Amino acid sequence: MIDERDRIIIDMLTKDARTPFTEIAKVLGISETAVRKRVRALEEAGIIKGYTVKVNPAKLGYNLVSITGVDTKPEKIFEVAHKLKEFDFVKELYLTSGDHMIMAEIWAKDGEDLADIISNKIGKIDGVTKVCPAIILERLK
């Protein structure tokens, strides 16, 4: 079980994965070694699964980000998901129980690139029945 100190560690690392353990130790009033042990325990328990970098897609030339719903024939859902995972333009991929069977975050250079991705790449995967892109206008959080 995690305690309040673990929750503070998780919160601080979620806001900035590069937060020095010495800074966390000062906030918690414990030693850096104690923080290091707690983080290692959180990692071993699978609570902390990894550390990541947030990238601004536009700075890399991707001016359109789309949250795209993909529907499939029921028997093809896992095959389609596996194929979607292989595309570099798919940055996040989820199986869902909502309006669409699969949701994908797609980075595209522009509208033409997104149309090509939807029509000629995703739309041509065997088993795909519907592709519904929603272009992100602004990331708020």
Image: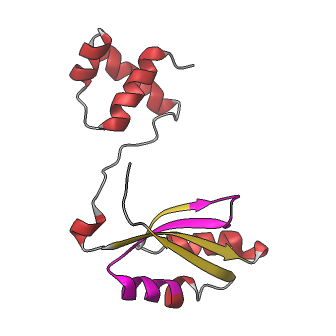
| In the image, residue 103 lies in the stretch drawn in magenta | yes
| In the image, residue 132 lies in the stretch drawn in magenta | no
Q: Is residue 26 left or right of residue 141?
A: left
> Residue at horizontal 46%, vertical 28%?
42
Q: Is residue 10 visible?
A: yes
Residue at the limit of the structure toward the right, as seen here = 75
| Residue 130 on image: x %, y % | 65, 81
Q: What stretch of residues is rendered in magenta?
A: 94-118
Quadrant in the rendering for residue 76 = bottom right
Q: Is residue 22 left or right of residue 74?
A: left
Classify 20 as above or below 53: above
> Residue at horizontal 29%, vertical 8%?
29
Residue 43 or residue 140, whichever sits in front: 140
> Residue at horizontal 68%, vertical 60%?
98
| Residue 39 on image: x %, y % | 39, 26
Q: Is residue 32 visible?
A: no
Say which quadrant the N terminus sits in.
top right
